Amino acid sequence: MPRRSARYSSFPDYPLADVPALKRRLRAEGRDVIDLGAGDALLAPPPVAVDALARAAGVPENSRYAFQLGLPAFREAVARWMRGRFGVALDPFTEVLPLIGSKEGIAHLAFAYLEPGDATILPDPGYQPYRGGTLLAGAEPVALALRPENDFLLPFRDLPPDVCSRAKILYLNYPNNPTAAIAPAEYLRDAVAFCHEHDVLLVYDNAYSEIAFDGYVPPSILEFDGARDIAVEFHSMSKTYNMTGWRLGWAAGSAEAVGALARVKTFVDTGVFLAVQAAGAAVLEGSADWVRANVEQFRRRRDAAADGLEGAGFAVDRPVATMYLWVPVPAGESSQAFARRALLDEAVVVMPGAALGAGGEGFFRIALTEGAGRLVEAGERLGRVARAAGAAAR
């Protein structure tokens, strides 16, 4: 076999890559595994999605190539949803693009703008496609740590001039995965201004825009003056609608950036199954009440998980958005070591912060994927892991 490329070799290990095999082993041993690692909730999608998919799958024309145009009805539903939710008017055919989940769109956009010598600015910890797309395009990822003293806001104003001059893309994600942080309006306005100052494309990952609690309403970056010229926003059906496996999302914003991404995608895929797009359109048009009820389930899970963890001695901030808790690791242990002991000793899967970037060290992530009772039990088990570490240290 030929030698693998330098770009391939530059990839970090993917988070939780070995966890499926370990889970199988533990379950084969009769252990009760509580998996709070991946953000993949054990909840059903909206019934309207299943019904619309069944109908559309029976239409022979929907089994043909979608190409990048996709289903016009889906594009139009997205445009209506964006206007109703954010007050942003978009042309469904030049400023909206269907995606095979937002993940591939985020990664593929890098190919339209980056080349060797360029840089991207990305959050650390952060979603892997920001770094992966950058590396595959041959550019340099410049990772900035998200730390509690900065309210987990990416400090792009701290960058030196030489990085700003090489930067082509700034990746932002609020509400944030994994920290669950939110960004104030003044910060987002400054991000738009920064990108105008340095001729940088603002890639705004808004996958958690609808999972918010306690009266908080996340914005779109496209609501801010000047953003339409330099920003493209990514949305996903995965988290809001419990449709992770359906692989459907969209990009919206700058017609130039959306068009560039569409051109890249013509060389790597032929679009989302049209029946899935029909289901997506039906969901966007008729699931507002369902979404409110689904978000309420996540709120109850948030509170149950926080109660369980606090009762076990952990310090927990209750986030107002996302499906995650970002929890400090007990003193004296790395996030990787704590997560490994949690799995092997107590059969609980959590995401070590360092698996999502060096800036995540000192924390672990809980995904609200299980019901309230299981989350409380997970907190009790994790408390035993922490106490065992404390006893060993003494």
Image (cartoon, rainbow, N blue to C red):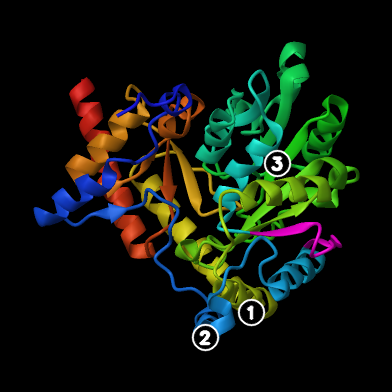
In the image, residue 191 sits, relative to residue 358, either above or below, namely: below
First of labels 2, 3 by sequence position? 2
N-terminal label among 3 and 1: 3
Q: Amino acid at mark 2?
A: Asp
Residue at which label 1 appears: 282
Q: Is residue 369 magenta?
A: no
At label 2, counting other C-alpha atoms closer than 10 Å, the crowd grade (few under 14, some 14-19, many 20 or more) is few
The extreme front residue here reads 1
Residue 70 percent across, percent down from the top left: 66, 67
Q: Which mark is residue 382?
A: none
**With respect to residue 379, does 329 lie above or below?**
above
> For residue 203, which numbered disc appears in the image?
3
Residue 87 located within the stretch drawn in magenta: yes
Please state the horizontal and vertical placement of residue 43, each as a whole percent of the image. 43, 69
Look at the image and give the residue range highlighted in magenta. Answer: 86-98
Query: Is there a contact, CB below 8 Å, between mark 1 and mark 2?
Result: yes
Q: Which residue is located at x 33 percent, y 64 percent? A: 373
Name the side, left or right, on which 170 lies relative to 333: right
Mark 1 → mark 2, Cα distance in angstroms: 9 Å
Q: Nearer the viewer, residue 377 or 249?
A: 249
Side of 302 where 348 appears, left or right: left
Q: Nearer the viewer, residue 275 or 252?
A: 275
Residue 63 shows in this picture? yes
Residue type at the position of mark 3:
Val
Q: Earlier in the sequence, mark 1 or mark 2?
A: 2
**What is the spatial separation of the Cα atoms under label 2 and label 3, in whole angstroms?**
33 Å
Query: Which secondary structure is most common in the magenta stretch?
Result: loop
| Rendered location of residue 66, percent (x, y) | 61, 67
Q: Which residue is mark 2?
A: 51
In the foreground, 52 or 355:
52
